[in-house]
Amino acid sequence: MTERIYEAQHRAFSLLEEKGLDAGAIRFLMEHITGFSHASLLANMRTYLTEEQHHRFWQKVDELLEGKPVQYVIGHEVFYGRTFQVNENVLIPRPETEELIVEALKRMKKLFGESNPTVADIGTGSGAIAITMKLESPQLEVTATDISESALRVAKQNATELGAAIDFKQGDLTEPLAHKTWDVVLSNPPYIARSEASEMTDTVLDYEPHRALFAEEDGLYCYRKLAEQLPKLMNKPGLIGVEFGHAQGRAVYHLFSESFPNAVIETVKDINGKDRMLFCEIRE
């Protein structure tokens, strides 16, 4: 005999709480195992798990107890209302990056009107930015790059499953884009200083790809390189949008204002009131 849903869920919840882990992950895991929506799960709490569901559930609870993020355990994360496949070759998409897309689309409408700008997403990871931009504005010509071949495989799978036509290129920062000029460049690059590793949770440190998390020069390396390389690659009008760590706003602003002295540059706060994004509007 297996357990009822509520029994298994309660027992697993307690085990994660005892280890100081995110017990809220159990609900997402149970929805994944049973195929129920949140509402259906609540309505079926007294339903027994099948033998196979019971086995898979507890197998994956063991992974959670090891500190593995639930998104990697179930293999996906919801971003901008769509389901993206994720594994340990890509960062888990964060809600803050949804805000980068909202702000970019708003500024693009103002800068480009009804025209169809070319868009590049540098360091695409799971493809979340590039694919969402394409699906929100299907007329866009979108290119996505990443230095990691493994990450690009995940991004290509997501693009196929979500029906987004993206041109994927492998290479470091702007190198794959140097063959032409661009209207819009977006990026959520690695920005955590290696000295900050001690402040991070084991769940992130042990499982998410370090190449996509950490950068040299106190986390500012990629911004310095982008600020150096992008002037010769941007059209006029043009738009650059980057996400950064909440304490990096002033430094990132300084880098881009030096490279684009005539641009309109703005740092934007996220939903939590922290500086999180920079937009550089090139008009002349």
Image (cartoon, helix red, strand yellow):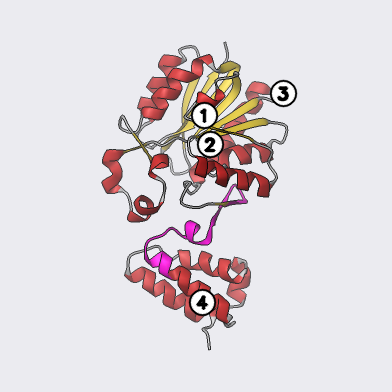
- Say whether disc 2 or disc 3 marks the residue closer to the N-terminus: 2
Marks 3 and 1, how far apart in space?
19 Å
Mark found first going from the N terminus, 4 or 1: 4
Question: Which amino acid lies under the numbered mark 2 shown in the image of this protein?
Answer: Leu
Residue interval drawn in magenta: 62-84
Residue 100, numbered circle: 2
Q: The C terminus lies in which quarter of the figure?
A: top right
Residue position marked by numbered label 3 in the rendering: 115
Q: Earlier in the sequence, mark 3 or mark 1?
A: 3
User: Are the residues flagged by discs 2 and 1 in contact, CB closer than 8 Å?
Assistant: yes
Q: Is residue 220 visible?
A: yes
Q: Earlier in the sequence, mark 3 or mark 4?
A: 4
Let me know if residue 102 is in the magenta part: no
- Mark 2 or mark 4: name the one nearer the start of the chain: 4
User: Which circle marks residue 241 in the picture?
Assistant: 1
Give the number of the mark in front: 3 or 4.
Answer: 4
Instruction: Compute the Cα span from label 2 to label 4.
Output: 40 Å
Residue 164: image location, x then y, percent = 68, 41
Foreground residue, 15 or 38? Answer: 15
**Residue bearing the label numbered 4:** 55
The foreground one among 94 and 213 is 213
Q: Tell me which residue sits at (56%, 44%) in the image.
A: 153
Q: Position of residue 255 (x, y in %)?
A: 39, 21
Assess disc 3: are there few (<14), some (14-19) or many (≥20) residues with their C-alpha within 10 Å of its C-alpha. few
Residue type at mark 3 is Ser
- Of residues 107 and 125, the one nearer the viewer is 125
70 falls in the magenta region: yes
Query: Could you tell me residue 220's position as x and y percent?
Result: 36, 29
Q: Which mark is residue 64?
A: none
